[in-house]
Amino acid sequence: MKVGDLIKLHPGAVMAQDLSTDIALLVEKLPRPDAWEYDWSALVGGRLVKFGRQIEDSSPEVLSESR
């Protein structure tokens, strides 16, 4: 996954963040000082939402890849 990809979120991520849709546009990788290395900032339903990089494992469906 990379910045600009449109992904389908896992239902658990949608419920945890109380989101109105399961479609997210990855906007930015946010660095972290720990072993997880980075988080994702994503645009979801008009909101900018922060996710842990675990969404890469739980949201394998990339709907549209950026170039």
Image (cartoon, rainbow, N blue to C red):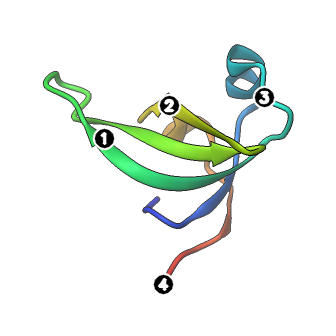
Mark 4 element type: loop
Other-residue count near label 2 (Cα within 10 Å), few / some / many at <14 / 14–19 / ≥20 = some
Mark 1 element type: strand
Residue 19 or 34: which is nearer the viewer? Answer: 19
In this view, the residue farthest toward the left is 33
Residue 44: x, y in percent? Answer: 70, 43
Q: In whole angstroms, how far apart are the C-alphas of marks 3 and 2?
A: 12 Å
In this view, the residue farthest toward the right is 20
Residue 20: x, y in percent? Answer: 86, 33
* Sooner in the amino-acid sequence: mark 1 or mark 2: 1
* Sooner in the amino-acid sequence: mark 4 or mark 1: 1
Q: In whole angstroms, how far apart are the C-alphas of marks 1 and 2?
A: 10 Å
C-beta proximity under 8 Å, tags 1 and 3: no
On residue 67, which mark appears?
4
Other-residue count near label 1 (Cα within 10 Å), few / some / many at <14 / 14–19 / ≥20 = some
Other-residue count near label 3 (Cα within 10 Å), few / some / many at <14 / 14–19 / ≥20 = some
Taking the spot 47% from the left edge, 42% from the top edge, the residue there is 41
Q: In whole angstroms, how far apart are the C-alphas of marks 4 and 1?
A: 20 Å
Residue linked to disc 1: 30
Residue 44 or 63: which is nearer the viewer? Answer: 44
Residue linked to disc 2: 51
Q: Is residue 31 above or below residue 18?
A: below
Q: In whole angstroms, how far apart are the C-alphas of marks 1 and 3?
A: 20 Å
